[in-house]
Amino acid sequence: MAIGLHDSPFKNPVIRWVDQRLPVFTMMQKEYGTFPTPRNFNYFWNFGALAMINLLIMIATGVFLSMHYTAHTAYAFDSVERIMRDVNYGWLIRYVHMNGASMFFIVVYIHIWRGLYYGSYKAPRELLWMLGVVIFLLMMATAFMGYVLPWGQMSFWGATVITNLFSAIPLVGHDIVIWLWGGFSVDNPTLNRFFSLHYLLPFVIVGVVFLHVAALHITGSNNPLGIEPKGPQDTLPFHPYYTIKDSVGMVAYFAVFAFLVFFMPNYLGHPDNYIPANPLSTPAHIVPEWYFLPFYAILRAVPDKLGGVVLMFGSIAILFVLPWLDTSKVRSMRFRPIARIFLLLWTINFFVLMWVGAKPAEGHYVLIAQIATVIYFAYFLVVLPALGRLEKPLPLPESIARAVLGPNATLGGGPVPGAVAAKPMDKA
């Protein structure tokens, strides 16, 4: 081998020639082939890979849509209709992109819930979790700007309502709103800015996803038991075991996605967005897309505009400090029965916020939103810190291998290496 060339393990002459000079195949083999992963993953661990696939779908369809879209208030709505009617398979690309946003949020919400249930935010994975929250915020910004682009009634009025929220910021709020608009109202400069950012932000998300995955491969994956692998007997190579398992989840995911695209393409959208934007006609009820509804409910639960904005952004910001709010030494809620009940109640409360966010901000809906908002924040600020000190967890298993294969499990014809007597509790 020539001096300076990487010693590639691959036999294929073309792959070996490339890998010796740029060892990308060695890196992929190390990070996605032989990378050791806990042997007890369940199907909740599919959703990270599904989120990555969904992101690629959104970028690919978005690039094609941008070829036919016109970012001008006079032509935006008509250009979208032209995509639907005149561009070959334009209807399919648009429906995949439009429903892909909903599928993306479904996948990410489940991914976040899995992290909450199994304690994937705890040490040493705090930064991994925080990068995930950054991805979530970038997703929300990208989705909001994308919703504005068709320039229908909900697009225009949604942009008007949400951008006006920044006016609640003392001293500089009004200037921020004018800067966002590019003028003194939501108009053509606003649409151009949103289109540019909507195109750019997915590539920013790709960059943060790269950091997210890098952090994951440094600290290793969490697992349903919430205990660290104690040796090779607790892990499996990522390929072929989890590539096959991810493929099964991907088939199920694409089946749901295809059903939504071909049979219910407009089910998750708002019919008013098929009406061209009209600044002189305010819709009877302005609502965002379904995935924003819980946070929209929190915004409207507070009578004070600034207070509502602070709580709405605070409902996401609180996730950044979650690793320090949960004081329990045990990760997985499999071993925390009381915490599991409270997480279930919080999850129901999240859906209540989603439901009330779609209702008018009047009458008993306001009271329900206020109660649900208090419950949302109380879970993070009161319940988790208190349970960490008061709840007595169940005993943890001695190792992943013993929990998966049983107390008499053997590997390679002998006892599982590193097996020790069971402890009443192993703090993970």
Image: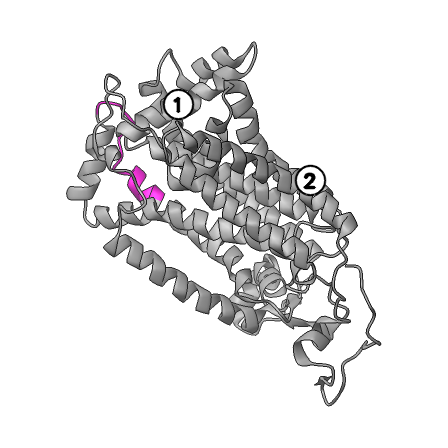
Q: Is residue 43 visible?
A: yes
Q: Position of residue 136 (x, y in %)?
A: 52, 41
Sequence-wise, the earlier of marks 2 and 1 is 1
| Residue identifier under label 1 | 161
Q: Which residues are magenta?
A: 62-74
Give above or below for 290 relative to 314: below
How far apart in space, not on screen, are marks 2 and 1 (Cα)? 32 Å
Q: Residue furthest bottom?
A: 413
Number of marks in picture: 2
| Residue identifier under label 2 | 382
Q: Is residue 86 visible?
A: no
Looking at numbered disc 2 in the image, what kind of residue is underneath it? Val
Image quadrant assignment for residue 64: top left
Asked if marks 2 and 1 touch (Cβ < 8 Å), the reply is no
Residue 293 within the segment the image draws in magenta = no
Image quadrant assignment for residue 198: top left
